[in-house]
Amino acid sequence: HKSVSRNDLRLADLKPRLGKTSLIMSLVSEEFPDDVPLRAEEITIPADVTPERVPTHIVDYSGNNSNVTANVICIVYSVNNKKVPLILVGNKSDLVEHSSMETILPIMNQYSDIETCVECSAKNLKNISELFYYAQKAVLHPTGPLYCPEEKE
Ligand code: GTP
Ligand code: MG
């Protein structure tokens, strides 16, 4: 169990409009926002209402200020550093009948940085609190390797 006094959580994505701001606002107000700003205000969820009793600071991100669209996205990581746990969030599950888990699970198992994945819907309020719970758990009870194999002597 890791001891942390504050959990810093940043929502980022590979494309705009996937629902980051809606997810934060659905968590906070327990209803789907009809009008959603580009970015949610930074908030800190107090310790006493979080499952792991650690205050959680949530920062929204919007890369939407530019009109640049990409044909390819490079996710850059540093091979010599321990990484921050990633959680794959499949939002807008209300729009499909089928789960994407079958596709996602093999990817998750291949990359140890991916702590967990969750399918949710900001609109139906499905798995919203679970998502933020997993984000706390990933920090407090990490399951990933505690060392980089190359650095092991
Ligand atoms: P940027 O800040 O522009 O990158 O977007 P964002 O990732 O913050 O997405 P945002 O919350 O602004 O939502 C984008 C659009 O998707 C809005 O029209 C939302 O109403 C819609 N949306 C968000 N979450 C859901 C969801 O769970 N289901 C459905 N059906 N629509 C959603
Ligand atoms: Mg946004």
Image (cartoon, helix red, strand yellow):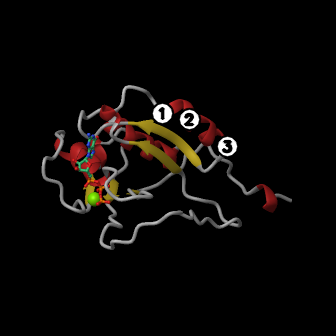
Left or right? Give the position of 128 relative to 4.
left
Residue at which label 2 appears: 103
Amino acid type, label 2: Thr
Amino acid type, label 1: Ser
**Could you tell me which secondary element the residue under label 1 belongs to?**
loop
Left or right? Give the position of 101 relative to 17.
right
Left or right? Give the position of 98 relative to 34.
right
Residue at which label 1 appears: 100
Q: Which residue lies at the image location 49% right of the left edge and 39% below the top edge?
A: 117
Instruction: Work out whether mark 3 precedes mark 1 in sequence or the reverse, and give the earlier one.
Output: 1
Q: Nearer the viewer, residue 54 or 86?
A: 86
Disc 2 and disc 1: Cα gap in Å?
Answer: 6 Å
Q: Which residue lies at the image location 55% right of the left edge and 38% below the top edge?
A: 104
Instruction: Work out whether mark 2 precedes mark 3 in sequence or the reverse, and give the earlier one.
Output: 2
* Residue 25 position in % (x across, y down): 22, 49
Residue at which label 3 appears: 110
* Residue 84 position in % (x across, y down): 55, 57
Q: Nearer the viewer, mark 2 or mark 3?
A: 2
Q: Nearer the viewer, residue 102 or 140?
A: 102
Amino acid type, label 3: Gln
* Residue 124 position in % (x across, y down): 24, 33
Q: Residues within 10 Å of mark 2 (few under 14, many from 20)?
A: few
Q: Are marks 2 and 1 in contact (CB under 8 Å)?
A: yes
Q: Which residue lies at the image location 71% right of the left edge and 67% below the top edge?
A: 80
Disc 2 and disc 3: Cα gap in Å?
Answer: 12 Å
Q: Nearer the viewer, residue 19 or 136?
A: 19
Residue 49 appears in the rendering: yes
For label 2, being within 8 Å of ligand 1 is answered: no
**Could you tell me which secondary element the residue under label 3 belongs to?**
helix
Q: Which residue lies at the image location 32% right of the left edge and 42% below the top edge?
A: 50
The quarter of the picture where residue 134 lies is: top left
Quarter holding the N terminus is top right
